Image (cartoon, coloured by chain):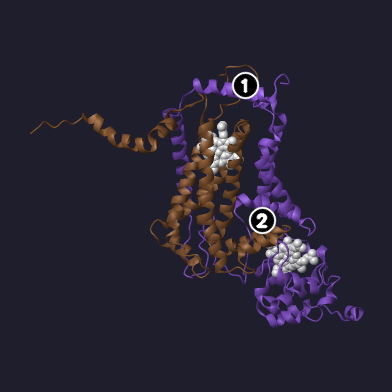
Chain colours: A purple, B brown
Amino acid sequence: MPRYTARERRERYLREYDFQKRTGKQFFPYAIYHDAIMSVIVVGVIIAMAVFWRMDFGAVPTDASAAREGGLLGPAYESRADPAIEGYDPKPEWYFFFLFELLKIFKTPELLIVGSVIIPTLMMMALIALPFIDRRPERRVSRRPVAMAVGVAVPIVLLALTWRGDQGAGIAGEASNRPGATAFAQTLGCGTCHKLADAGTAGNVGPVLDDALPDYAEAVQVITNGRGAMPAFEDIGEDQINCIAGYVATWSGGEGETPGPNAASAEQAYPAACEAAGGEYAGEAGASAAGVPSRGGSAQAAG
Amino acid sequence: MPPLNLPPVKEVAKIPGDWVEERSGLVSVSKYFLFRNVPRDISWLQTLGSALITVFIVQVTTGILLAMYYKPSTEEAFDSIRYITDEATLGWLVRGMHKWGSSVMVILLFLHMGRTFLFGAYKYPRELTWISGALIFILVMAMSFTGYLLVFDQRAYWATVVGVNINGTAPILGPFLSEFLKVGPEFTTETLTRFYALHMLVLPAAITGLIVLHNWLVVRLGVTSPPWSKHRATKGDV
Ligand code: HEM
């Protein structure tokens, strides 16, 4: 419509809308009648979901910290929050899955900020600024090809990310019975976020440890203090931290019975710290002896 | 005794209304609201916004009921949730409606946004209506984030730890924001009370204000008719 100036177009719209209103119908009772029906349906759906949720509840647990199981719509509650971590699943509400999935796509430390901050901020800014980005006056669907393409693509991407975010981390295999492996894969839930072949985990939130190959000092540092999206695990205790760090430093990049390239850095602590930590950290009795690599050679190389 | 000179019943019934009207003008405002015209071919697609008002009222009501039993401290939060779910009369219903109401609200938000996008309703003169809506959307997401922690079970706790850490990765503001949310480097009872205050006071108040603004604009400007409407005064795109 090059014939009209912007101001003429605005006036034209106002005149047109004035006609729509003059020849329209009253809000009460015509529009409000539809509104009322819709609201009744929506409240009905909410009540129905609460009831279906309730119908699948398991028995009230006798243990005051245990979860109360549920069915399709999920448990009534999971077990009591425990900062010292036992079996842990950092899953957000479903409508945050797409953000969570972005983190998995940009998971290297340099790119993390792209998924965690830059893209969400740009999305929010685009949402708010839309009236200024698309300033053409056309309203007909057929005359807004770009807007319609964006309007179809964005929901598809969001739905795809949400769907992928709903898929569990997946288990790559079984944890070995080396000291620290069970704690890594199960007790502490490191495997929800990290892939580590020896522990049989395939988490995809954090870096693949078989590629990152952290050494002992770095692992202790990261596990104690957290970094980026990774939570700090300082509450689990010093021996426990040293054991897990030793396990990670020794076995990331390891194959079969051969430990990974940074094994020597953990020499002092691993597996002694695991024995001191005991429990799930110790590895299987007997198996632990077999699982400990003989590293005389590498120690000399390191010294 | 002089005869009682009462006006007819119909007139008497009007007295309170006239009294209010004379002092506030509220009656004519309501009349304007109810008897204003809307374009003749609006349909079910335009009911999503009012459904959102309804869901918001459901959330506020169930939220107030929950607040009467909820205890925002790390020691008691989980036990109060257990009490509400397992023992309190119809507690499961109140909690269930609040929990599922939040999901329904997010879905309706997306649908309502989609419909206003499709209709080009964000264009002149309704830019501010869209912007106020977008702000509501962001605040509703913040409601979900702060509400999720309150159950204080394993999943809630750890998802929030990770979420706060993610905030912390932002440059400059990030560490400040995550320290603000956590009240220091650790998750403590103060963290929980801070989330609780945001969730039940600050954010709902802000959202309420924005909903009022949003709908004042909607009433003032009128809702758009579908862009494919045949009922037009002028030809061509306007
Ligand atoms: C709690 C949240 C919200 C409430 C209660 C609400 C309420 C309403 C209501 C009652 C209407 C009247 C027409 C209709 O029902 O479709 C409306 C229109 C509108 N809303 Fe919302 N809304 C909300 C969120 C949003 C969001 C997130 C956006 C977009 C970012 C948005 C953008 C608009 C626009 C542009 C209109 C004008 C539509 C037209 O004139 O055709 N709203 N809103």
- Asked whether, in this view, residue B200 is left or right of residue A249, the answer is left
The response on whether ligand 1 sits within 8 Å of label 1 is no
**Which quadrant of the figure contains the N terminus of chain B?**
top left
**Vertical relation: A77 (above or below) B16:** below
**Which residue is depicted at the point 64% across and 60% down?**
A90
Closer to viewer: mark 2 or mark 1: 1
**Which quadrant of the figure contains the C terminus of chain B?**
top right
- Asked whether, in this view, residue B62 is left or right of residue B118, the answer is left
Q: Are marks 2 and 1 on the same chain?
A: yes
Q: Position of residue A112 (x, y in %)?
A: 76, 56
Q: Position of residue B27 (x, y in %)?
A: 38, 34
Chain ID at mark 2: A
Q: Secondary structure at mark 1?
A: helix
Q: Residues within 10 Å of mark 1 (few under 14, many from 20)?
A: some
Res. B9 image quadrant:
top left
Q: Can you tell which mark lies on residue A168?
A: 2
| Residue, disc 1 | A12
Cα distance in 3D space between marks 2 and 1: 54 Å
The amino acid sitting under disc 2 is Gly
Which residue in the rendered view is the most extreme toward the right? A301
